[in-house]
Image (tube, rainbow, N blue to C red):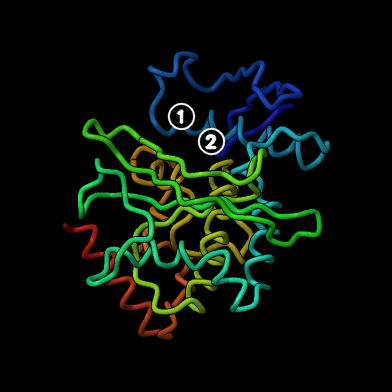
Amino acid sequence: MRVHDNDETEHTVAVGFDGEIQGHSQDGYPDDPAKRTGKENEYVSQARRYAKYYVAKEKGYDVLPWDRDTAAMQRVQTAIESLSDEDFEKYFGTYFDQINSRLPNVTAPVPEPDAVGDDEFVLYLLDVYLDEAGRIEAVSDIHFLYLDDNRERQVVLGDQPLNRDPDARLQLKPNYLPSLEVAQEFFVYHLRCQIRDCYLLRGEEPPEQYRVIGPGLYDAATRYLYEDRPYRPYHKLHADIPGYSLEFDYGFGEQGKEMAKIAGAVADNK
């Protein structure tokens, strides 16, 4: 298929039935990735991601990576949102405790890897599986993502209950969530941010409901940090991006939003 990127360069992309890119040509940038700018390389990547998305959406082929499937993310959003208080605690209570575990007098239900220092970066990952009716069937044990001494990504996986890909993966930093009720709303919002990232990573402006600020996909956040990429810091709670807003208040109304923005700015300046 032919794709025009946001720099008006035309790409011809061949997507295999397994989702692999079998061919890609374009006439706007150097063929050698090392000779392209960061922005040019990202436009090339966006064209590939959009091609896979188009083939999946318009042609019905299963070529999307599971963690870029926005339809599945939406189903998981709905499933989490509809849980009773009791069922939410059943599936997500341990993850809630893990997210709060760096607070004083809180013990982590799952110890972090030894390589992760007390104040070092870590993400807690949780896989969510749906049944055929769109209800939550199972969740995984907690996984960890951290950076080693060479700033290389490391992932430590916990047990995964089913022998198939999950429908979505929550990927959140240590945080303060004041209650399970707030956590339920936050996990739904987090998936909304993940859907935002899927649009942005394929070069599209998200629909209005997904133009929100907050933590989404880790892979997207790593791209947003580079000034030579065609992105803004959508993952940062204090980001000032026209048309985008922070719509999660941590259960404290507008004051909660302001507190979150201040905390995010302080963390960035450490």
* Residue marked by disc 2: 7
x, y (%) of residue 17?
76, 24
Q: Residue furthest left?
A: 270
Q: Residue at x 54, y 72 (%)?
A: 89
Q: Residue at x 24, y 40 (%)?
A: 115
The residue type indicated by label 2 comes to Asp
Q: Residue at x 28, y 49 (%)?
A: 121
Question: Which sits in the foreground, 142 or 36?
Answer: 142
* Residue marked by disc 1: 40
x, y (%) of residue 141?
50, 51
Query: Mark 1 packing: few (<14 Cα in 10 Å), some, or many (20+)?
Result: many
Residue 137, quarter of the rendered image: bottom right
x, y (%) of residue 210?
58, 62
Disc 1 to disc 2: CB gap under 8 Å:
yes
Q: Is residue 210 left or right of residue 141?
A: right
Q: Residue furthest right?
A: 59
Query: Mark 2 packing: few (<14 Cα in 10 Å), some, or many (20+)?
Result: few
How many numbered marks have been drawn onto this rendered protein structure? 2
Q: Secondary structure at mark 2?
A: loop
Q: Secondary structure at mark 1?
A: helix
